[in-house]
Image (spheres, rainbow, N blue to C red):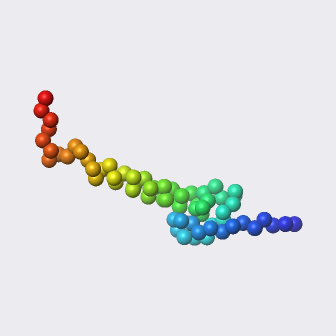
Amino acid sequence: MTQSKSRLVTCPSCKKQSEYSADNPFRPFCCERCRLIDLGCWAAENYRVPIEQDPFDESAPPPLS
Ligand SMILES: [Zn+2]
């Protein structure tokens, strides 16, 4: 019988060796948790930018109408 050689990749989250195959739906991550951790990091980075440049600062005087 022929055994298909599966490629091993390093999980970007925990640096563990994981299988890069169709059996691993979370590739290149080793598991679902590592994949979510990586996505969470991305979300946190994205949220920081708009908060830093908040045009509605409380120190600014309110518009008079
Ligand atoms: Zn991992």
**Quadrant of the image occupied by residue 31:** bottom right
Tally the numbered discs: 0
Task: Judge left or right: residue 11 versus residue 51.
Answer: right
Residue drawn at (57%, 66%), measured in percent from left and top?
11
Pick the quarter of the image with the N terminus: bottom right
**Residue at figure coordinates x 53%, y 65% from the top left:** 12
Q: Is residue 63 above or below residue 39?
A: above
Work out which residue is located at the far right of the displayed protein and give it. 1
Q: Where's residue 65, x and y in %?
A: 13, 29
Residue 30 placement (x, y as % from top left): 59, 63
Compare residues 23 and 20 and report the one nearer the observer: 20
Tell me the residue at 37%/51% (across/down): 47
Residue 51 position in % (x across, y down): 30, 50
Q: Percent from the top left, x then y, of residue 42?
A: 44, 56
Residue at horizontal 28 percent and vertical 53 percent from the top: 52
Q: Is residue 61 left or right of residue 4?
A: left
Q: Which residue occupies the foreground of this view, 24 or 59?
A: 59
Left or right, residue 27 beside residue 14: right
